[in-house]
Image (cartoon, helix red, strand yellow):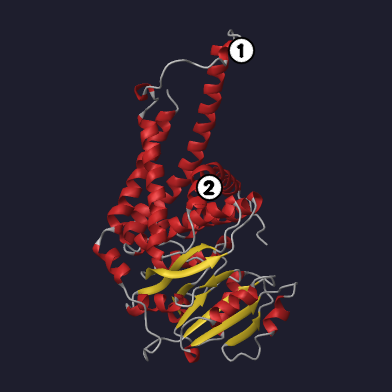
């Protein structure tokens, strides 16, 4: 049996999901979200907000992160910034101390390590209506908070995510991640209109404080506390919104080993949280698109990424062997003689497999382009599209295979 036949179902599912995203993007709820206007600074009804910044050895970036929060366009008497040192051993506490005299900034220390512990310590210290999280290597645009606030007008909304991209991508690997993150802007915008968001990323996700407290605060969540909290919100019946123009920038891994380590943690966190504590959401019509489409396709995406990689390697080796056998009896000098004649497109190799592959790639590149326009994220995407097209398919299977192996063997990897 041709190995390509194994790939067809996965490619069809991918194209189905891309079609689902396109149709949902054009739906009335999604159009309404795009038309939503940002809040105004002078609005007396603006809620109080506390942004928690958990820090573990973030001396290089915590000052820039804090300064970006202090520059937010929001009434100063309604915005609190809580810096939580989570047992740092570098100069993080010293840098935090520079803000001790600022009335908007509260400085705390949590000795028990774990980002969820640091966030819970921050929550316990405030009475703000909304609490937000911002990783200490991330930076927000001044109008980001005003873009988020209107999402909470509906009391059923428990959390809202922002539009995340990479801060000043330097090498091709970071440009690849930037394109991927912008792809995620489109995806989260679309999924929010059907309440299908399954993770509230660390960079600038906001929550109703009373809802988080009612659900018992943040948990370790297999080292993905933001994913676990999103699933818990969904299970409790709350809506997770998205603010596509609330721009936040985050540092991205510069090397392949660092990227594999990060993505292995994310993937194992997804698989362990969903298959253990939240397996009841999968295939459950009560949870709509999240249960019937998003979570099942999440597992299919992991399986298809691994299968496509294996099939691609198999095909490359097979064709190389065939080429070697065909030319084994031909003198090398003759084999490399230039061919005469003109090129005819009629003889260009084509198959359903190639057609589906091209359609899938085109859909992904379209979503990246739409995400950039939707969020008005600055910068040039040429390098990002190039890197995403040629690098992502080679690297993603590596962390997918590692994560799947870790879950199957029950292996736990250290993160920090």
Considering every residue shown, the one lying at the far left of the view is 28
- Does the rendering let one see residue 120? no
The image quadrant where one finds the N terminus is top left
The image quadrant where one finds the C terminus is bottom right
Q: Secondary structure at mark 2?
A: helix
- Left or right, 285 with respect to 319, comes to left
The residue indicated by pointer 1 is: 333
- Residue at 54% across, 31% down: 313
- Does the rendering let one see residue 194? yes
- Residue at 65% across, 59% down: 415
The residue indicated by pointer 2 is: 387
Question: Which image quadrant for residue 68?
Answer: bottom right
Kindly report which numbered mark, 1 or 2, lies closer to the viewer in this rendering: 1
- Residue at 36% across, 69% down: 237
- Residue at 59% across, 74% down: 65
Q: CA distance from mark 1 to mark 2?
A: 36 Å
- Residue 9: x and y in percent read 37, 37
On screen, residue 415 above or below 122: above
Q: Earlier in the sequence, mark 1 or mark 2?
A: 1
Depth check: 404 or 101 in front? 101
Question: Which image quadrant for residue 107?
Answer: bottom right
- Residue 386: x and y in percent read 50, 46
- Left or right, 291 with respect to 112, comes to left
Depth check: 139 or 410 in front? 139
- Left or right, 153 with respect to 105, comes to left
- Residue 81: x and y in percent read 56, 83
Depth check: 228 or 33 in front? 33
The residue carrying pointer 2 sits among few (fewer than 14), some (14 to 19) or many (20 or more) residues within 10 Å by Cα, namely many
- Evaluate if marks 1 and 2 touch, with contact meaning CB atoms under 8 Å apart: no
On screen, residue 280 above or below 235: above
The residue carrying pointer 1 sits among few (fewer than 14), some (14 to 19) or many (20 or more) residues within 10 Å by Cα, namely few
Q: Secondary structure at mark 1?
A: helix
């Amino acid at each position: 049996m041709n190995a390509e036949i194994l790939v067809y179902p996965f490619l069809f599912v991918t194209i189905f999901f891309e079609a689902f995203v396109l149709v949902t993007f054009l739906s009335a709820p999604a159009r309404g979200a795009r038309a939503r206007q940002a809040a105004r600074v002078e609005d007396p009804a603006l809620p109080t907000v506390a942004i928690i910044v958990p820090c573990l050895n973030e001396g290089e970036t915590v000052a820039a992160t804090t300064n970006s929060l202090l520059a937010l366009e929001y009434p100063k008497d309604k915005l609190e910034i809580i810096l939580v040192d989570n047992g740092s051993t570098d100069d993080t506490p010293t840098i935090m101390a520079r803000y001790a005299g600022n009335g908007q900034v509260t400085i705390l220390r949590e000795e028990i390590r774990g980002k969820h512990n640091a966030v819970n310590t921050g929550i316990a210290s405030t009475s703000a209506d909304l609490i937000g999280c911002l990783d200490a290597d991330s930076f927000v645009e001044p109008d980001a908070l005003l873009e988020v606030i209107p999402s909470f007008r509906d009391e059923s909304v428990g959390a809202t995510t922002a539009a995340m991209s990479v801060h000043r991508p330097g090498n091709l690997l970071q440009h690849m991640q930037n394109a991927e993150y912008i792809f995620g802007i489109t995806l989260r915008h679309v999924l929010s209109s059907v309440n299908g968001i399954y993770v509230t990323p660390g960079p600038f996700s906001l929550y109703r404080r009373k809802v988080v407290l009612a659900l018992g605060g943040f948990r370790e969540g297999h080292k993905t506390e933001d994913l676990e909290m999103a699933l818990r919100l969904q299970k409790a019946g709350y809506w997770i919104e998205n603010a596509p123009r609330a721009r936040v920038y985050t540092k991205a891994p510069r090397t392949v080993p660092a990227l594999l380590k990060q993505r292995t943690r994310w993937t194992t966190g997804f698989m362990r949280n969903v298959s253990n504590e939240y397996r009841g959401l999968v295939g459950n019509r009560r949870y709509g698109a999240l249960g019937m489409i998003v979570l099942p396709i999440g597992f299919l995406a992991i399986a298809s990424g691994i299968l496509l990689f294996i099939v691609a390697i198999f095909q490359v080796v097979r064709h190389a062997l065939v080429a070697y056998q065909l030319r084994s009896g031909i003198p090398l000098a003759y084999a490399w003689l230039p061919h005469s004649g003109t090129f005819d497109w009629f003889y260009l190799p084509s198959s359903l497999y190639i057609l589906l592959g091209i359609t899938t790639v085109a859909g992904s590149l379209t979503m990246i382009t739409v995400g950039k326009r939707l969020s008005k994220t600055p910068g040039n995407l040429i390098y990002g599209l190039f890197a995403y097209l040629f690098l992502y398919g080679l690297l993603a299977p590596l962390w997918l295979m590692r994560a799947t192996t870790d879950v199957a063997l029950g292996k736990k990897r250290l993160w920090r």
